Amino acid sequence: MDVFLSDFDSYSESSSSDGYEDDDFMYTGQATSILSNLQETIGNIDDFLLFERRYVHGDIVVYSSDSQMGKVTNVEMVVDLENINGDKKLKDINSNKLGRIRSISAGEFVISGPWVGRAQHITDSVTVLFDDDTKCEFTVTGLEAEKLVPISPDIMDDSQYPYYPGQRVKGVNLTPSKSSKWFCGSKNKNQDEGTVCSVETGLVHVNWLGCVLHCSESMPKPPSLQDSKDLTPISCFSHSNWQIGDWCMLPKAEHTSFTDHPVHKQSNNCSEMFVISKMKCKVDVLWQDGSESCGLHSSSLGPINTLDAHDFWPHQFVLEKGTSSDDEQDRKWGVVKAVDANEKTAKVKWESEIEETTVSVYELIEHPDYSYNQGDLVFRLNKDQIVETSDLYLAHIGIVIGLKNGFVQVKWAAGFTSKVAPHEVLRVEKSEATPSLNIQQDQDKAELSLDASDKSFSDSDEDDDGLKTTIFNVPRAAIGFLSNVAKRLLGFPFYASLSAAPGHVSEKGSISGLDEEDDPVLVETSSEVRVKESSSKNLKDFRQFDMVNDCSDHHFVDKSSISSQVKKCWLKKVQQEWSILANNLPETIYVRVFEERMDLIRAAIVGAPGTPYHDGLFFFDIFLPPEYPHEPPMVHYESGGLRVNPNLYESGRVCLSLLKTWTGTGSETWNPNGSTILQVLVSLQALVLNKNPYFNEAGYDEQVGSPEGEKKSGSYNENAFLMSCKSMLYILRKPPKHFEALVEQHLSKRCMNILMACKAYLEGVPVGCCSDVEAGGQGNSTGFKIMLSKLVPKLVEAFTAKGFDCGEFKSSNNVAG
C-alpha cells in the first residue's frame, strides 16, 4: 500500500495540467468500469453476508429500539431450495412442506408402548433401484455397508447421511441376507449399479427416559436396540428447526418433477432431495407486559443471550419466595399476568385469590414443579385410567406447546391437543431414569440433606485404649513444635491431649494427659488458656485470629487425612500460613483455626463499603488437603440457601480460579510457591464481593459500559443487597460456632447504619451509594423498594430481639419509602 501511494504521489507531481485531458481520455472509461464492477461486487457480498436471523420457540428477543424483552411463541418459515445437481431452484417454499431424509432423527423422542426415550444412533434402511429394474432394501450395518458402495460424488459432504435419494451406488457381491430384501425382479449379475430411491430409519439405539405407568415392573424397559417400525416418534416445531445448508425432501406434488436425468434413468417413485439455500422467518412474540405481536420479521428483532433469575414472562407459574426461610412453609403459587421490566414488578394471579396482585420480582421464583417450557416432554398423571393398549399410551405422552391462563397446552402423541392443569402432568427429566423414580430420589436426597444439616455432631468416640481419635490426628512428637508455634502466634500454646478431650484443663491449671515438665511453655501458660477461653465471649474487641476447640459444625469435618502422621513439610506450611494470617489480616477479616484439626479453618469477611454487601458478614469454611500447598485449599461458603453472588452458590460452592474451581491464567491461579490462605480471603472480599458482582459471571465482563450491561448490573446489585439482608437474618438466627460474639458485636454496632442505608435506598439512593441521587439518576426499581420495605421490619424485629438499639427505626413506619 505504501508503494502504491508513493508511486501515485510521484506521478501526480511529475504530471502537468496539460496532460489532464489525456489522462481523462485514457482512464475515465476504465475507472467507470472498475467502479461499476466494484459496486456490483459489494452488492453481491452484502447479499451473501445478509443471513436471515433464525429463531426457535422459546427464544428471548428484543426490538432494537425498545428495551422490553419478549419470548418467541410461534415461527413461520419459508425457504429457497436447490436440488442436488444445482440445476433447479425453488423459492418461498413453506417449511411445513419439507420432509426429513429419515423418519426419525438422532435426539428425537420416541415411544414404545408406555415407555418413552430419546433416539441416539440411527442405522439406515436404504432402498436401491438397480439399472435392470430390480429393487432391493438394505439395512446398512456392519458388512452390509461394504456391499453398497457409493459411486456418486460426495455432494452432501456430511457423514451423518452416507446415503441419500438420487445417489448412485454399486452393489458388491450381492446375495440375499437377513438384512436385505428383494422387492421385485431377478438380479442380473452384470447390472450391479443403481440409484438410491429412499433412505428410511432402520435400527435405532434408544436411551429410555421413563414409563407412563405407575409401576414400570409390569412393563419392563424395552431393549435399547429397536426397529424403527416399532417406534412412534413424537416432536413439535420441527418446521422451525431447519437451517441453511440442511438437506430435505419435498413431495413431487409441490414442484415440477425432474424431466431428464443427464446419465441414468430413475424410477418415478424415487424421492427427490434439496438443500436449503436461503430462509425467511416471521415470528409471534409474547412481550413481558402481556401484549403480543404476530408476524414480525426476524430481522427486526435482536437476540437476548443473558437473563437473570428475575426475568419472568406472562403465563409463567411462579412461587412466592418470602422474605426469610421462616416464611417458606406455606408459600403461595400463582400465574404471572404481566411484568414491568424496568420497575422490576409483576402482576400475579395467585391460585387462592381472585384479584391480581402487584409484587416485586425479587420475591418470586419459578415454580419448581410447574417449570414448563415449549418442547418439554410430559406424562399425564391420571394413569389409573390407562388401559394397557398402545393407542391409549399415546394419549398420555405429549409435548408442551404453550402456557395459557394457568393451563398447560399439550400436543399428545395420539395427535390431538388439549389444555391441562399444571398438576395434571409431570415433566420428564431428560436423563436416564424413570421420572417418578427421579422425583422420589430427589425427595430422598433433600430429606437426607436436611437431616444432615440439622444433625448435631457429637464428639468423636474414644478407642479401646481411651485415646481421643480425630479425623486428623497430630503425632505426639509434633506437640512441642506446634506449642511453640502457637505461643509465638497467639500468646498461648497449641495442645492436643491424647488421653482426654482437647482443651480440658485440670484444677491445677495443667492440661490432662501432659505433665508440666513435658513442656515448659504449657506450664507457664496453661492457666492463661483457661482465662482467655472463658472470657473471650465478653471481650468488646473480637480477636481477628484465634485458636479454638470443637470443629463439629465445620463443613469439611468429615474429610480424612492421608495418614495419621502429619508430614513435616505440611506442618511447616501451616506454620507459615498461621503466621501470615496472625500478622497481616485486614481489619474486616476474622479467622479461627482448630487445635484438634489443623487442616480446618473458618473465616468471616465483612462486606466492603460501596458494594451491595456493605456491613454484611460472610462465612467460609476452609480445608487444607494433605497435598497442600501443591493443591489449593477447598473452600465452602455458608450460604443459608441464598445466592448472593455469581461466584457463591446456594450449595456453598465457591467459584474462583485461585481455587481451581474456575479457569484462569498467571497470577489468577494457585501457585504452590506463593499463594496463601490470606490471598484467598482477600480475593473473596475484593474480587468476589465487589461493587459490580454482575460482571463476575463468565463472559459478562464484555458488557461493562454498555447500556444493557449497566442496567442488568444495577438490577443484580438490588437483589444482592436483598440477599445480604436475608443473610443477616440467617446468621442472627444461626451464627456459626466460635463467631457468635462477632455476629452480635458487629451487627450491634452496624445495625443503625444498615437501617439508615435501607431508608436511603427506599428514597431512591442507588444501592452501594452513600449520598442522595444525583441529577438524572435513575434510583432504584419499584420492585426493589417493595421487597426492601418488607425486609426492613424483619431486620428491626431481629435486631431488637437481640437487644440492639434501633433508635427511630423501632417503628417500621419510619422507613417507609
Image (spheres, helix red, strand yellow):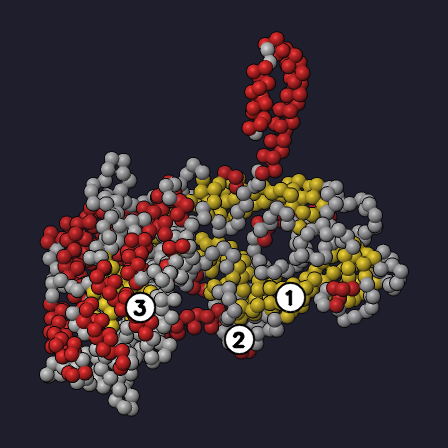
Label 3's element?
helix
Q: Do the residues labelled 1 and 2 touch (CB within 8 Å)?
A: no
Kind of residue indicated by mark 3: Lys
Say which label, 1 or 2, has the lower sequence index: 1
Residue at left 64%, top 24%? 34
Q: Position of residue 718 (x, y in %)?
A: 29, 50
Report the disc number at residue 573: 3
- Viewer-closest of 189 and 654: 654
Residue at left 52%, top 61%? 377
Q: In this view, does 194 lie to the left or right of 112?
A: right
Name, please, the residue furthest toward the top.
18
Residue at left 81%, top 46%? 261
The residue to which callout 2 is attached is: 216
State how far apart marks 3 and 1 are (Cα): 58 Å
Say which label, 3 or 1, has the lower sequence index: 1
Quarter occupied by residue 669: bottom left
Q: Are marks 3 and 1 in contact (CB under 8 Å)?
A: no
- Viewer-closest of 110 and 305: 305
163 to 88, vertically: above or below? below
Q: Is residue 155 left or right of residue 176?
A: left
301 to 150, vertically: above or below? above
Local crowd size for mark 2, using a 10 Å CA cut-off: few (<14), some (14–19), many (≥20): some
